[in-house]
Amino acid sequence: EIVLTQSPGTLSLSPGERATLSCRASQSVSSPYLGWYQQKPGQPPRLLIFGASHRASGIPDRFGGSGSGTDFTLTISRLEPEDFAVYYCQQYGSSPWTFGQGTKVEIK
Amino acid sequence: QVRLVQYGGGVVQPGGSLTLSCATSGFTFSSYGMHWVRQAPGKGLEWVAVIFYDANYRYYADSVKGRFTISRDDSSDTLFLEMNSLRADDTGLYYCARVAYCRGGACYAELDYWGQGSLVTVSS
C-alpha cells in the first residue's frame, strides 16, 4: 500500500500569500497517478489537479501542481478568500487507492 | 451535465446492513469506472471500493473486504454499495465518485465528479 503523508497539517496564511502544500509517498507513484482535491465544509471534494501537474477543468491558474516519484507539491500562488479549505492528495495508480490525511489552509 | 445523486443512508445497528445508491446522468455510465469514498466525522477521506466499467474488476479496502459489495446496473445508470456486518467505525459520509476515464480495460484515473454524500450512522 502506498501511504501518502501530507505536510503541514495546518497552514495559517493571509489572503494574497502563497501556499505550498507537500505530499510525500512511501513508494514511487507510477505515471504519475497523483491528484489533488479541495474540500470545503459541507461539500464533496473537488478535483483540482490530475497527473501531478494538470489543472482540472475550470480551476484557476493560481493553482499549480508539481513533482514526481515520491514528492509532490500543490502551490496556490495568491490565496483568495475562497481558497481556505482542506486539501487532499490521492494516488490512483495502484490498489489500494489512497489519500493523504489532508492539509487545512486557514486564515491567519 | 454530469450528475451523481445519492440515495440511502441512515441509522443502523451494529451488525446490520444497508445499501447505498448513486444515480447518474449526463454521461455514458457503462463506459466509466466508479468509486466509493467515505469520510468519518471530522476526519479525512478514505477510499472504500472501485468497480471498473465492465464490472469484471472490483477492488476493496482491507477494512471493508468481505463485508461490502460494490455493484452497478448499467441499464439504470446506477452504482450501489451493499454494506453488511456494519460496525461503529463504518460511520461516516459516503461519496460516490466517477473515474475520469478508463483505458485499455483499466480505470486508473482521477475522480472528476462526486455525489453529494450519504450519511451512514452505525449505533445501537
Image (spheres, coloured by chain):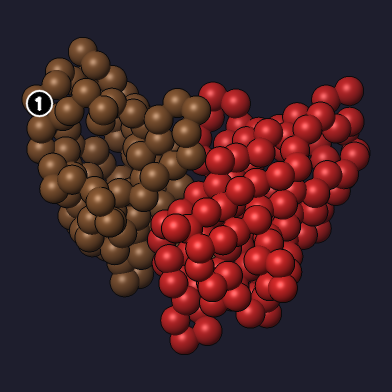
Chain colours: A brown, B red
Residue A45 sits in quarter:
top left
Whether A3 is drawn above or below B24: the answer is above
Q: Position of residue B26 (x, y in %)?
A: 51, 63
Q: Residues within 10 Å of mark 1 (few under 14, many from 20)?
A: few
- Element class at badge 1: loop
In this rendered view, identify the residue nearer to me: A10 or B78: B78
Q: Is residue B55 visible?
A: yes
- The percent coordinates of residue A74 (x first, y second) are 22, 45
Placement of B21 over or under B91, stated as above or below = below
Q: What is the chain letter for disc 1?
A: A
Residue B17 rendering spot, x and y as whole percentages:
87, 44
Task: Look at label 1 and name its amino acid.
Answer: Glu
Q: Residue at x 75, y 38 (%)?
A: B9
- Which of A2 and B23 lies nearest the eye of the viewer? B23
Relative placement, left or right, of A86 versus B38 is: left
Residue drawn at x 25%, y 42% as measured from the top left: A22
Q: Position of residue A25 (x, y in %)?
A: 36, 53
User: In this orientation, does residue A1 appear?
Assistant: no
A92 with respect to B66 (left or right): left
Residue at image point 28% right, 20% down:
A106
**A15 or B116: which is nearer to us?**
B116
| Picture quadrant of residue B87 | top right
Residue at position x 10%, y 38% in the image: A77
Q: Residue furthest top?
A: A108
- For mark 1, what is the residue? A17
Q: Total number of numbered labels?
A: 1
Image quarter in which the C terminus of chain A is found: top left
Furthest residue toward bottom: B104
Compared across the picture, whether A80 is left or right of A4 comes to left
